[in-house]
Amino acid sequence: MAVSKSRLDASRFFLRLAIGSMAILMGFEALRHAAFPSTLGGAGFWALHVAEMLCGALIVLGFLMPYASVLLTAVVAYPLVVGWMHGAPVLGNLHGLFMLCVVLSTALGGAGQWALGRD
């Protein structure tokens, strides 16, 4: 069955809204429980989560979508890959793996018609 263009644009919009909102909330939650950075490692932690929140906001708006989704994919994939390199099971973090798959689908699907920066 073929899908109409308006239904496809609506599904892209709701996918962008869900993924961007989840990225904003995940970044905010991590920053809320972290102390102000006094070391380089703490500053890197803050920068990672601020980038996650910024990418989430850009994805919600649909502005600079390819760059924001690639950066958010890297931010989500980094802890997973580091864990796998240190011996963690591949299915050990299902939430992170699900986030990675969903962010990749957002990156591949594009922003759609209802976005500030149309592809």
Image: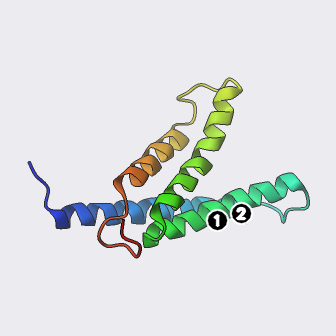
Q: Position of residue 23 (x, y in %)?
A: 54, 60
Instruction: Report, in whole angstroms, how far the alpha carbon at label 1 lies from the one at label 2.
Output: 5 Å
The residue lying furthest to the right in this view is 38
From this view, report whether residue 110 is shown above or below residue 114: above
Residue labelled with disc 2: 31
Q: Residue type at mark 2?
A: Leu
- Please, which residue is most extreme toward the bottom here? 116
User: Which residue is denoted by mark 1 in the rendering?
Assistant: 28
| Identity of the residue drawn at 75% across and 60% down | 46
Q: Is residue 48 left or right of residue 2?
A: right
Dot 2, crowdedness within 10 Å: few (<14), some or many (≥20)? some
- Location of residue 8 by image quarter: bottom left
Q: Position of residue 17 (x, y in %)?
A: 41, 66
Image quarter where the C terminus lies is: bottom left
In the rendered structure, which amino acid carries the disc numbered 1? Answer: Phe
Query: Is the C-beta separation of discs 1 and 2 under 8 Å?
Result: yes
Judged left or right of residue 23, residue 117 is: left
